[in-house]
């Protein structure tokens, strides 16, 4: 799905973040359109990076009227010659499309303090890490074990979304746990409360990292060392690589008290979407799944890799699949966030895993997690 948004005041432009483009599109050979049912609205659009379009406001003058439409809207690429629709994605409008985003900390002082001007608040801490969790145990232990070697426990935050077992029973007493009431699983809502919480942490920390419980950001030379060298940079950082550590036949179940690299030796490469814009010194608005950030600039860091533990243990994977299938979902998730290909059968899943080509975990990662 695609999102129309404004990240700041622009001179007659807004932006559309594309989730995926089904084909390799040549900018010279296509025209862009918003489709409402069978009606096509022309967009004067051009790529500013591989997945973001800049759209001329004048070519979409009555865009705000779409707020009240009930039809599903699509952003479409159409061949200039044949008029064939080459690619289309469902289009959503982020709230910034309709309302300017104002950060009170960037507004100069008003009378009677106008003569004081603007003084940026000196943030007391460099780096915080947070995640969101529901009924996780082993993964959350692995998450805490890794990140507590980078920052103190008191700079780790877990948003617990109504788990049956309170994480405070098995995490360090200094790790911060924020308990939310349990509602139906809704990925839009998850993106929303994580986005708000990231902004909250940024009031006191220069850099904030958000990851899922099964995601570890590793960096050559050290993550905290990289952040310290770039402490004053204002940007969103994205890893240039992403890997998934795999459980091979014959390997024991994972022990959260030991390093993963002592128990697993192989990985598979992940698709580009799993590199994720996770680390930021500016507020971030994530789309569902945290694969896309609407703000900019986004910097790709060569020495940074996002390590996924989704397949580090087949029994944990099967349990999570079962939980995902059975969990109560919102109407949004029922319609738009499927649970296809989430097998709950051991032999079926292991057979799928065994058929893949794997690589060895690089030496520089050994001992990091």
Image (tube, rainbow, N blue to C red):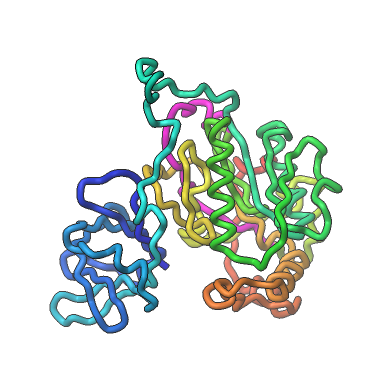
**Residue appearing at x 28%, y 77% in the figure:** 86
- Nearest the viewer among 285 and 58 is 58
Q: Which quarter of the image is occupied by the N terminus?
A: bottom left
Asked if residue 319 is positioned above or below residue 241 in the image, the reply reads below
In-image side of 300 versus 156 (left or right): left
Side (left or right) of 87 relative to 249:
left
- Give me the residue at 41% from left, 56% from top: 95
- 108 and 338: which is toward the camera: 108
The residue lying furthest to the left in this view is: 81
Q: Which span of residues is magenta-colored?
A: 224-246
Does the magenta portion include 152?
no
Residue 148's spot in the image, x, y percent? 71, 37
Task: Answer with the quarter of the image where residue 29 lies.
Answer: bottom left
Position above or below: 140 against 127:
below
- Residue 127 falls in which quadrant of the image? top right
- Picture coordinates of residue 165 (x, y %)? 83, 56
At 28% from the left and 54% from the top, the residue drawn is 14
* Side of 49 relative to 257 (left or right): left
- Measuring 60% from the left and 26% from the top, which residue is drawn there? 125
């Amino acid at each position: 799905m695609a999102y129309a948004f404004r990240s700041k005041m622009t001179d007659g432009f807004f932006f559309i973040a594309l989730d995926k483009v089904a084909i390799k599109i040549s900018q010279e050979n296509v025209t862009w359109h918003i489709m409402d049912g069978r009606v096509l609205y022309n967009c004067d659009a051009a790529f500013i990076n591989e997945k973001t379009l800049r759209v001329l406001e004048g070519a979409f003058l009555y865009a705000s009227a779409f707020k009240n439409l009930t039809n599903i809207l699509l952003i479409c690429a159409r061949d200039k010659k044949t008029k064939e629709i080459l690619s289309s994605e469902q289009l959503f409008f982020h709230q910034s499309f309709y309302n300017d985003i104002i950060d009170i900390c960037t507004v100069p002082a008003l009378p009677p303090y106008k003569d004081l001007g603007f003084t940026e608040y000196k943030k007391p801490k460099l780096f915080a890490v947070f995640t969101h969790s529901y009924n996780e145990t082993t993964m959350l232990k692995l998450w805490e074990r890794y990140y507590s070697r980078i920052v103190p426990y008191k700079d780790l935050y877990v948003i617990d979304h109504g788990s049956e077992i309170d994480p405070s029973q098995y995490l360090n007493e200094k790790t911060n746990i924020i308990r939310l009431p349990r509602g139906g699983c809704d990925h839009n809502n998850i993106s929303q409360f994580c986005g708000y919480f990231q902004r909250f942490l940024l009031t006191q920390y220069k850099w904030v990292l958000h990851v899922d419980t099964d995601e570890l950001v590793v960096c050559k030379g050290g993550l905290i060392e990289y952040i310290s060298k770039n402490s004053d940079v204002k940007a969103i950082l994205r890893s240039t690589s992403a890997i998934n550590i795999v459980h091979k036949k014959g390997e024991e179940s994972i022990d959260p008290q030991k390093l993963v690299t002592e128990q697993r030796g192989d990985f598979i490469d992940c698709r580009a979407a799993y590199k994720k814009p996770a680390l930021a010194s500016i507020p971030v608005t994530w789309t569902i799944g945290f694969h896309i950030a609407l703000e900019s600039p986004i910097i790709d860091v060569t020495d940074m890799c996002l390590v996924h533990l989704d397949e580090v243990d087949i029994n944990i994977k099967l349990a999570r699949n079962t939980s995902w299938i059975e969990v109560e979902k919102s109407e949004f998730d029922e319609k738009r966030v499927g649970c296809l290909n989430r097998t709950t059968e051991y032999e079926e899943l292991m057979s799928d895993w065994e058929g893949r080509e794997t690589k060895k975990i690089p030496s520089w990662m050994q001992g990091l997690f």
